[in-house]
Amino acid sequence: MPDVDGPAERPEDPGAGILRPPTGMFHGDRTAVPKDLSGRLWVFLTRPEDVQEELWRRRPAAAG
């Protein structure tokens, strides 16, 4: 998905919701987790940054 921010910010039906708003992850992905009216969880994902493995392994430790 090219843009996780747009769809995640505007659930179309009352009762739908966002369990995790769009978030940049240490491994380079940007994800959002919405829930639909039937209770299904979805994961919207895009990769705005290609992270080299060496940096990918160091980022979680740097985050805390």
Image (spheres, rainbow, N blue to C red):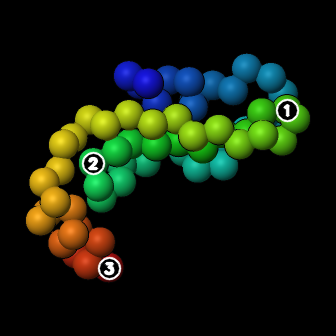
Q: Which residue is mark 2?
A: 28
Give the residue drawn at x 71%, y 43%: 41
Q: Quadrant of the N terminus?
A: top left
Figure check: 55 above or below 51: below
Q: CA distance from mark 3 to mark 1?
A: 35 Å
Quadrant in the picture for residue 38: top right
Asked if the residue at tag 2 contacts the one at tag 1, i.e. Cβ–Cβ closer than 8 Å, the answer is no
Quadrant in the picture for residue 62: bottom left
Q: CA distance from mark 2 to mark 3?
A: 17 Å
Q: Quadrant of the C terminus?
A: bottom left
| Left or right of 29 in this view: 61 | left
The tag earlier along the polypeptide, 1 or 2, is: 2
Figure check: 57 above or below 47: below
* Residue closest to the eye, 12 or 1: 1
Q: Position of residue 6 (x, y in %)?
A: 50, 23
* Residue closest to the eye, 19 or 41: 41
Residue 24 shows up from this direction: yes
Identify the mark at residue 37; answer none if there is no mark: 1
The tag earlier along the polypeptide, 3 or 1, is: 1
Which residue is most to the front? Answer: 53
Give the residue drawn at x 18%, y 43%: 50
Secondary element under disc 2, as helix, strand or loop, is loop
Q: Which residue is mark 3?
A: 64
Q: Amino acid at mark 1?
A: Leu
The tag earlier along the polypeptide, 2 or 3, is: 2
